[in-house]
Image: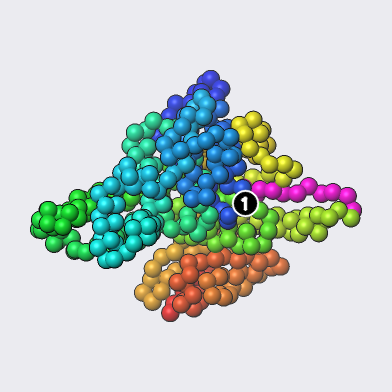
Amino acid sequence: MYRSLVFPGFFISERMRIILFTGKGGVGKTTIAAATAIKTSGQGLRTLIISTDPAHSLSDALGYHLGPEPMEVRDNLYAQELDVYYSMQKYWQNIRELMLTVFRWQGVEKVLAEEMSAIPGMEEASAFLWIEKYYQEQFYDLIVIDSAPTGETLTLLTLPQVTKWWAIKALPLQRFAVRNIGKVARLATGIPVDKGYEELENIFGKLESIQKIFADHEICSIRLVTNPEKMVINESKRAYTYLNLYGYNVDAVIINRILEAEGEGSVFSNYIKSQKKYLADIEDNFSDLPVFKIIHQGEEVFGIEKLSKFADLLYRDSDPGAVLHNESPYQLDEIKNGYLLKIKLPFLKEKNFSINKYGDEIVIQIDNRRKNIFLPRFVKLYQLSSHNYQAPWLHVTLEK
C-alpha cells in the first residue's frame, strides 16, 4: 500500500499495489484501466499500465504506439502491451527451443510448431512473470492491469497447476530421467531437455509466488467492469463469486456506459428503461461493494486529456489507488460428502426467504427480491441438501 503525506498529491510507496480490471469483452475495461492509471500517475504514484489482452487496444486508448517493454508515456506513467512470443524469446528461450524441437520431431510443420510452442496459459503466465519481476524490483508504486475478458482472467486462478501438468505431459521425458540423462540427451539430440526443465522449474516457482501476491488483499485488488445489460451482469455475478471463492479481493464494481434519460419517443427510451432495472439489480447484488457509475460520454474516449476528464467523473472524491473494500461475502469449504457454502447475508433472519439450486446457480428469494449466485461449474454435480442461518452467514450444504 501507500500512504499520503502532508503535501497533497505526494505519496511514499510502502509496498507496490496491483489493480486488475476484468469484465466481459466490450464493456470498456481498457478505457477505465487507462483512465485509472492516468489519475494515479497524476497523484504522484509511479504507475505502470499493462495490457494482457491479445486483442490489444491500449495503444489506441492512450494515443501512443506501445511495445512489449514498458514505455514512459508521461511523468509517472508507463505503459506496456504484452507479447507472448517476445516474452518467450526473452525469458523462455530454452523452453521454446525444446517445444519447437519436440513438435518438429513428431512431424509437425514449422509454422504450426511455432504456434503450438506457446503452452496453453502462457499468455497469462507471461503477464504473471513480468509482474513478478516488477514486484521484486519495486520500481513502480502501482501496476494497473487491463486484462483479457473474464473467462481468460479466471484461468489465472489455476494457472501454475494447469500449465505445469500440460508441459510435463507434452515433454518427452519424466523429471527423474531428465536429472539423470538430460545432459546426455541434449548432446545426442540437440534438444535442450535439461535446460528446458530447469527453466520450467524456475517459472513454476515464480508463478506460484505471484499467485500468492495476487491473493494478498492488501496488495492486489480486482475491479469488475460491467454494463447495465442482462448478459453482462450475469457474467459479472459469476466472476464475482469465483474470484471470492478462490481468495481474490474484488474491491469495486464499475458500471460503464449508462445512458441518460431523453425525451418521450426517443429511439433509446426502452433501452434506458431496461437500464434502470438492471442498475437496481447491480446495486442489489453487489450491495456490499463500492459501486461506481459513469454515464455514456456520447463519444469515443481516447487520449490523455479525455481519459483524465473521464477519470475525474468516474472516481470524483475517491482514491483510485486505495484498497476500496476488503471482505469476501462467500466462502466454500470442503466437507465429508461435498461442500459447505457460506454466504454473508446480514439481517436475513428477519426476512422470509427460500433457497433453490439450478445447475451451477443458487437462487435465494428474499421477500420479493431474488439473489442469483453463480458457482464453479463442477458444483452442477452436487445437490442442495440443507441450509441454516447463523447470523450473518447463510450456510448451504451441497452433497453428491
Report the side of 264 relative to 302 (left or right): right
Front-lying residue, 104 or 151: 104
Is residue 180 something one can see in this rendering?
yes
**Image spot of residue 62 (x, y percent):** 57, 36
Neighbour class for label 1 at 10 Å: few (<14), some, many (≥20)? Answer: many
**Image spot of residue 386 (x, y percent):** 50, 76
Magenta-span inclusion, residue 258? yes
User: Which span is picked out in magenta?
Assistant: 254-264
Image color mode = rainbow
Report the side of 20 relative to 355 (left or right): left
Quarter of image, res 117:
bottom left
Looking at the image, which residue is at 56% across and 27% down?
42
Q: Is residue 221 above or below residue 48?
A: below
Under mark 1, the amino acid is Val
Looking at the image, which residue is at 81% across and 59% down?
270
Looking at the image, which residue is at 19% across and 55% down?
191
Quarter of the figure that contains the C terminus: bottom left
As drawn, the residue found furthest toward the right would be: 264
Front-lying residue, 28 or 346: 28
Quarter of the figure that contains the N terminus: top left
**Image spot of residue 344 (x, y percent):** 54, 59
Magenta-span inclusion, residue 73? no
Front-lying residue, 292 or 365: 292
> Which type of secondary structure does the marked residue at label 1 adopt?
loop
Is residue 329 something one can see in this rendering?
no
As drawn, the residue found furthest toward the top would be: 7
Q: Which residue is mark 1?
A: 27
Looking at the image, which residue is at 90% across and 53% down?
264
